[in-house]
Image (tube, helix red, strand yellow):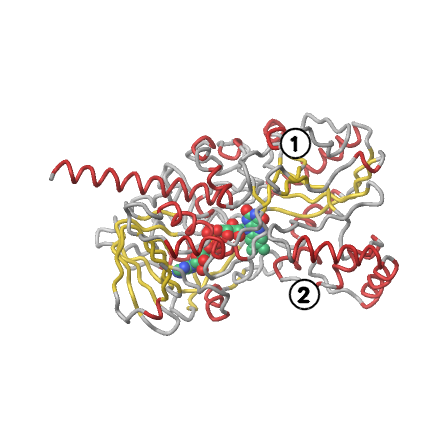
C-alpha cells in the first residue's frame, strides 16, 4: 500500500521487520524484491508522487566551488521514484578491473569481486528495462554489427562493449502499482527521515525520526534499517545522527562523506576518418528485444595497468553545439532551444558560457540555411523521444563527413579530500544542510590525458585519419561543466577494515548490526560506468541477504520452540 504521512497522527510509531529510507532506484528495487515475502516492510519516502518545490528544497545546500559542482538540489530528485524520474537510462555493469586493488590507483579495491554481483545484474537489468544482460555486441546481436570504425584494431581499445538503454524507466511510475498491491509493503510518502537513533551501546539502530513539512513528528522501529536515500543524502543522514556517536554514525574514523566521486567527462578534439561515410557507425543499434544499444571506444584493462591510469570510455560525438562554426542546422536548433531543455541536460549540451549576440545570430543563420534538416530532426525528437514509450536516448547527428569529436567518460580516483560535510544552517525539517567540496586529482588528469593521447596515436598508427586536439586543453575540457552531475559515489565506502571504510562487504555499517546502505555511496571506486545498474544489483544483493537472515532467525526460533 502507499499512504501519506500527512494522514498519520502526530507521535505515531510505525513498526516493521525492514525499514527502507528512500524510494528511488535502490529503495524501490529492494522493496520489489521483498514484496510478498514473509517480511513486513516500510519504505519511508520524503517526496510525494509528483515533484513539489518545498520538498525539493530539502536538498538545497552549498558547494565549495560552483565552477566544479552544481548546487546539491540539482541532478537529484526528492520524490517517489527519486532521480530515476529524470535519469538518462544508460546502463552498463562495472568492469572486473574496477574491483581490483590497483597500486597505481590510491584507495582502490573492493572487498568483493564482480562475480559477487553477477547473480544480481540480470535482475537489475530487468528492473531497469534494459533487456538481457549482454554487454558486448557479440553476445547481444545474432549477426555481426557493422564496424564502429572499419579497420580500427588496437591493443589498447576495444569497440565491442555496449551500453544499453533503459526506457528510461521512472521507477516510481513503473513500479508504484506493484508496491501498492503488495500485501507486506507500506510506502509512506512525505515522511522525511531526520535522524537515526542508536541504542545506548551504539551497536544497533533503535528507531528513525520522521518529520513532515507540516510539523508532524513520527518514528519508525524495525529489525533492519536500510538507507537508500542517494549518494549524498546517505552521508548527510549518517553525519547528522549524532545522539550516541558524537561524530555521526559509522564515522569514528572520519570517513563518512569523504572520497566523494562523480565521473570525469568532456568533449575533446577533432577526429577525421579518411574513409567513406559508411566506414564509421556512431549511432545506436537496436537489439532483438527493441533495446537501444551503443558501442563505445573502451580502454582495455591491460592498457590501464600498463599506463597506470583509471578506466576510460569514449563515444564518437558531434561537434561542440555552442560553436556555430559547425554550420549544422540541427546543432544550432538545439542551441536556440536551450531554454526549454531541463537544466540537468541543458548544462552539458550548451555550456555555461554566455553567448554573444553575434553567436546567436550565427546559430539563427545555420538553422535558416538548413530548414529541412532542422524540421526533420524536430519531428524525430517529437516522435522517437517525446512521444515514444522507449525514448531515443540522445542526439545523434548523421554526419555529412566523417568528422567527430570525442566524448569521454572516465573513472575518478577516490580522494579523501573530496568530501561532503554538514553546515550549521538547517532545512525546513531541522536537518543540517550539506556542503559539497568535490575535488579532482592529478591522477584524474593523467587518466584522461594519457587515454586521449593513446587514442590519437592509434588513429595515426592505423592510418585511418587524424585526431587533432590540444593536450593543454584537457584539464579545461574535463572541468568545463564541472563534475559529471547525477553520479554521487563513494561517501560511505565499502571495505573490510573499519579504519578505512564505512560499510562491510555486505553493505552493513561497521559496528551497527542492523543498519545497511543501498546506494552508490558504498562504491569504493567509480569505474567508467554509469552507476545505476550496479546500485540496483547491490540493492538486490542486500535484499537477498535480509531475506536469508530473517529466514535463519525464524528457523532458530522454531528450533527452540
Ligand atoms: C540528469 C541525470 C541523468 C542521469 N542519467 C543516468 C544514466 O544514464 N545512467 C545511470 O546509471 N545513472 C544516471 N543518473 C543517475 C541516477 O539517476 C542515480 O544513480 C540513481 O537514481 C540513484 O539511485 P538512488 O536510489 O541511490 O537515489 P535516488 O534515485 O536519488 O533516490 C533517493 C530517494 O531517497 C529519498 N530521500 C532522500 N532523503 C530522504 C530522507 N531524509 N527521508 C526519506 N527519503 C529520502 C528521495 O526523495 C529519493 O526518492 C542520472 C542522474 C541525473 C540527474
Quadrant hosting residue 455: top right
Q: Which mark is residue 112?
A: none
Residue 154 location (% of width, % of height) = 71, 27
Would residue 265 be seen by someone viewing this image from the given angle?
Answer: yes
Of the two numbered discs 2 and 1 on the same chain, state the one appearing first in sequence: 1
Would residue 231 be seen by someone viewing this image from the given angle?
Answer: no
From the image, tell me which residue sits under label 1. 160
Given residues 144 and 213, the one toward you in this image is 144
Q: Quadrant of the C terminus?
A: top left
Given residues 464 and 32, the one toward you in this image is 32
Residue drawn at 26 percent across, 69 percent down? 11
Q: Quadrant of the N terminus?
A: bottom left
Residue 399 location (% of width, % of height) = 81, 45
In the image, is 309 to the left or to the right of 28?
right
The mark total stands at 2
Residue 518 location (% of width, % of height) = 41, 47
Quadrant hosting residue 46: bottom left
From the image, tell me which residue sits under label 2. 340
| Element type at mark 2 | helix
Mark 2 and mark 1: Cα distance apart in space:
35 Å
Crowd class of label 2 (few under 14; some 14 to 19; many from 20; radius 10 Å): few
Given residues 542 and 359, the one toward you in this image is 542
| Element type at mark 1 | loop
Given residues 453 and 179, the one toward you in this image is 179
Residue 556 sits above or below residue 248 on the image: above
Amino acid at each position: 500500500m502507499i499512504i501519506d504521512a500527512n494522514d498519520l497522527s502526530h507521535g505515531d510509531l510505525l513498526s516493521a521487520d525492514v525499514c527502507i529510507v528512500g524510494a528511488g532506484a535502490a529503495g524501490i528495487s529492494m522493496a520489489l524484491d521483498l514484496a510478498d515475502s514473509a517480511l513486513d516492510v516500510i519504505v519511508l519516502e520524503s517526496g510525494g508522487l509528483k515533484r513539489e518545490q518545498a520538498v525539493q528544497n530539502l536538498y538545497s545546500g552549498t558547494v565549495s566551488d560552483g565552477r566544479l559542482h552544481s548546487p546539491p538540489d540539482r541532478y537529484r530528485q526528492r520524490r517517489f521514484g527519486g532521480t530515476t524520474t529524470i535519469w538518462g537510462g544508460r546502463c552498463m555493469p562495472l568492469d572486473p578491473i574496477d574491483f581490483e586493488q590497483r597500486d597505481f590507483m590510491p584507495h582502490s579495491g573492493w572487498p568483493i569481486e564482480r562475480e559477487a554481483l553477477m547473480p544480481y545484474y540480470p535482475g537489475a537489468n530487468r528492473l531497469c528495462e534494459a533487456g538481457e544482460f549482454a554487454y558486448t555486441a557479440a553476445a547481444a546481436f545474432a549477426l555481426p554489427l557493422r564496424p564502429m570504425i572499419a579497420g580500427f584494431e588496437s591493443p589498447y581499445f576495444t569497440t565491442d562493449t555496449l551500453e544499453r538503454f533503459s526506457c528510461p524507466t521512472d521507477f516510481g511510475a513503473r513500479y508504484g502499482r506493484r508496491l501498492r498491491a503488495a500485501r507486506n509493503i507500506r510506502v509512506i510518502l512525505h515522511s522525511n527521515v531526520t535522524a537515526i537513533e542508536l541504542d545506548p551501546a551504539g551497536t544497533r539502530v533503535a528507531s528513525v525520526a520522521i518529520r513532515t513539512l507540516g510539523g508532524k513528528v513520527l518514528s519508525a522501529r524495525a529489525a533492519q534499517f536500510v538507507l537508500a536515500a542517494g549518494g549524498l543524502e546517505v552521508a548527510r543522514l549518517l553525519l547528522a545522527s549524532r545522539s550516541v556517536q558524537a561524530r555521526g554514525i559509522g564515522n569514528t574514523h572520519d570517513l563518512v562523506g569523504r572520497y566523494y566521486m562523480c565521473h570525469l567527462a568532456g568533449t575533446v578534439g577533432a577526429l577525421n576518418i579518411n574513409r567513406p561515410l559508411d566506414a564509421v557507425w556512431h549511432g545506436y543499434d537496436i537489439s532483438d528485444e527493441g533495446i537501444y544499444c551503443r558501442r563505445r571506444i573502451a580502454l582495455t584493462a591491460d592498457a590501464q595497468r600498463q599506463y597506470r591510469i583509471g578506466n576510460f570510455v569514449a563515444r564518437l560525438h558531434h561537434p561542440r553545439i555552442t560553436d556555430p562554426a559547425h554550420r549544422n542546422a540541427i546543432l544550432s536548433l538545439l542551441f536556440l532551444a536551450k531554454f526549454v531543455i531541463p537544466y540537468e541536460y541543458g548544462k552539458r549540451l550548451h555550456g555555461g558560457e554566455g553567448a554573444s549576440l553575434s553567436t546567436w545570430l550565427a546559430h539563427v543563420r545555420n538553422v535558416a540555411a538548413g530548414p529541412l534538416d532542422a524540421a526533420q530532426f524536430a519531428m524525430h525528437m517529437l516522435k522517437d523521444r517525446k512521444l515514444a514509450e522507449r525514448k531515443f536516448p540522445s542526439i545523434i547527428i548523421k554526419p555529412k563527413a566523417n568528422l567527430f569529436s570525442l566524448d569521454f567518460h572516465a573513472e575518478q580516483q577516490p580522494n579523501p579530500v573530496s568530501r561532503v560535510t554538514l553546515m550549521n544552517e538547517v532545512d525546513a525539517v531541522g536537518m543540517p544542510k550539506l556542503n559539497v567540496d568535490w575535488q579532482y586529482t592529478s591522477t584524474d588528469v593523467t587518466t584522461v590525458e594519457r587515454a586521449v593521447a593513446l587514442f590519437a596515436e592509434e588513429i595515426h598508427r592505423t592510418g585511418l585519419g587524424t585526431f587533432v586536439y590540444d593536450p593543454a586543453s584537457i584539464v579545461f575540457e574535463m572541468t568545463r561543466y564541472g563534475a559529471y552531475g547525477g553520479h554521487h559515489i563513494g561517501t560511505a565506502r565499502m571495505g573490510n577494515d573499519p579504519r578505512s571504510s564505512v560499510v562491510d562487504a555486505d553493505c552493513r555499517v561497521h559496528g551497527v548490526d542492523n543498519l545497511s546502505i543501498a546506494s552508490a555511496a558504498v562504491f569504493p571506486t567509480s569505474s567508467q560506468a554509469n552507476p545505476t545498474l550496479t546500485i540496483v544489483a547491490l540493492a538486490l544483493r542486500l535484499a537477498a541477504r535480509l531475506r536469508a537472515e530473517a529466514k535463519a532467525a525464524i528457523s532458530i526460533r522454531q528450533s527452540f520452540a
